[in-house]
Image (cartoon, coloured by chain):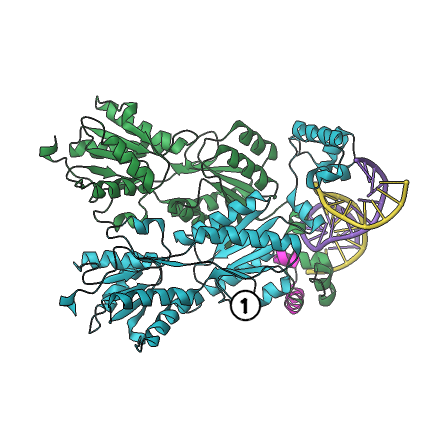
Chain colours: A cyan, B green, C purple, D yellow
Amino acid sequence: MISRPRIRDVASRAGVSTATVSRALSNPALVKPDTQIRIREAIAALGYVLDGSARALASGRAHTIGAIVPTLDNAIFARAVQGLQTTLSNSGYQLLIAAHEYNPDTEQALVRALLERSIDALLLVGTDHSPQTWDLIRGSRVPLLVTWSKTDLQPSIGFDNHQIGRLAAQHLLALGHRHLGVISGHCLHNDRARSRVEGFREALEQRGRQLPESHVIQQPFGFEGGRAGLRALLELRPRPTGIFCGNDVLAMGCLFEAQALGIDVPGELSIVGCDNLPISSQLTPSLTTIHLPTHELGQHAAGLLLQWLASGQMPPNECLPIELVARGTSGPPRKAAR
Amino acid sequence: MISRPRIRDVASRAGVSTATVSRALSNPALVKPDTQIRIREAIAALGYVLDGSARALASGRAHTIGAIVPTLDNAIFARAVQGLQTTLSNSGYQLLIAAHEYNPDTEQALVRALLERSIDALLLVGTDHSPQTWDLIRGSRVPLLVTWSKTDLQPSIGFDNHQIGRLAAQHLLALGHRHLGVISGHCLHNDRARSRVEGFREALEQRGRQLPESHVIQQPFGFEGGRAGLRALLELRPRPTGIFCGNDVLAMGCLFEAQALGIDVPGELSIVGCDNLPISSQLTPSLTTIHLPTHELGQHAAGLLLQWLASGQMPPNECLPIELVARGTSGPPRKAAR
DNA sequence: CTGAAAGCGCTTACAG
DNA sequence: CTGAAAGCGCTTACAG
């Protein structure tokens, strides 16, 4: 079995030097049109495919971006990654992806693994990362883009997670709810979850109300977490009539459990989620939630990264607009229940 | 700003040659324990991170796998990718991921893009790929693993998609349904969708029944596709009382549309999906569907790939077990409706 | 617009 | 168990 053709094979078939083939491939403007044509013919005839590791080594550009997300098992990250990948791909960049499943040690190992793959930039979700992770990244001199959270300490593109919590609280308060609870993912190592709860609490305190710790249930992300969260909140007296869930998956779990328990939503219980997954509007009742433009986040992140790599200039921090979408799972508390 | 440390910096700090450092990193058994320790100390002190492109060029191993899936926007692929990535990562491999969004030209461009990134193996979904795509892969000599479909022409790990259709048909027939319809994704360039419809049709024909083309509605994957599919099937006379949907997303769309139209499920209409997404069991009524172990598929695919790369031997074809899960959206047709 | 040649940072037979 | 050295396949100043 003969080995793959190399750039020298293309060069000799086209009657030029390897330098010229290389230029024709990466900077065609430098090559005379008819030379280009001969080279393209040779490439096609030989079925030549560039060796990216050699190119990366020689040029210092791997044309590859690394991204580490908490999980792909939540549509919200999957969609963002999809947007990221598509946009990168259109500019000749490919995506190395990994998921840490909310484990900081895993994240650290993945950061190292990706840095060892010669990536041109790294994308991470949120601002909570172990000190060793930060050291690794700093030492590597690889540009880092923080996503999902906004921070001034790093180039970032994200959402105002405090505002998410505030919007949820304001909505429930405006409807007349006075007994509120929160179902959140684990806040440890998760600044998004923490900020959302904090924002919710702040908005309550602004109205002279409190959100005691006992009214914030932390659960693993997932339907079961939402269900367990609701069961826990139902133990409280007085029972909460309005619940903010840290994301739509928890909110759906909460809704499904309420339905299973025969609790009327929104008559007896209002639920507000966050993300606005495609399915959220399809359910009956459909989910009141905070819309996060995550597909756009992926695309914008890709754009920022490409610009950064092309210009060498740190991109500005971007904060994407969010919006509460009032739907069927939230309404005024029923008089009878008060 | 000083540049990143290189292997020669580690070597001189540890008082050994670069060859020894290299061995300590990739094959520690060859290096004396105390030498190893000195090397590890030097690595830690300098914050040395290996350059993967140089390693790949010198060794011919990129420790990277490429995977192209139709989309990450369907949880089923996202879950499989997650399983794949986790397993690969545990063995020191990373994952380059891309999505073609059901466009064969995009797929071809992505295959080329990934092959140009020095991948050790490539994973594709299904058997339908353009001739040029096949040529590219063959010419590249990169091992190819086909997933989701079973085929004897390539190492593959997948499901018996014909059997999926057959199981759905048998279930609906056994319940007593005589007027059946199918909502499928577009079958062009999608052997999984095609096989499922064919399997469904075969099972009907085995019982002396037909499935005319008019009873197979092809729609884009998505809730709206499922909804439109149902509306189209409701035009038929006699109305189908049992519908097989090519995946759970279509099935959910179909269910949501039925609920919106006031059609009783399963009283007036039985629905069978495919995939068994986590949400399928949470809905009311919960979805009768065919369970596909997709997370396992990802893990097994990773295992096959790793074994293949380690041994150089083509792995055996694997076919993963599938199973119909009867739940709330299917039942006997109501007498009145017949 | 093009070519000769050095060099990117590793790995790995080969020799000891 | 370790080192010297060639070589992996590109790119890119440099010179023309």
Instruction: Report in which chain the residue with disc 1 lies.
Output: A
Question: Residue, x 66% and y 69% (percent of image)?
Answer: B45
User: The magenta stretch spans which residues?
Assistant: B23-45
Q: Which residue is mark 1?
A: A152
| Image quarter in which the N terminus of chain B is found | bottom right
Q: Main secondary structure of the magenta part?
A: helix
Q: In terms of image quadrants, where is residue A42?
A: top right
Mark 1: secondary structure: loop
Q: Is residue A331 above or below residue B146?
A: below
- Identify which residue, B149 or A135, lies in the foreground: A135
Q: In terms of image quadrants, where is residue A135?
A: bottom right
Question: Is A23 on the left or on the right of B206, as rendered?
Answer: right
| Image quarter in which the C terminus of chain B is found | top left
Question: Residue, x 35% and y 41% (percent of image)?
Answer: B222
Q: Is residue A148 visible?
A: no
Residue B290 magenta-highlighted:
no
Residue B36 magenta-highlighted:
yes
Q: Position of residue B226 (x, y in %)?
A: 30, 38
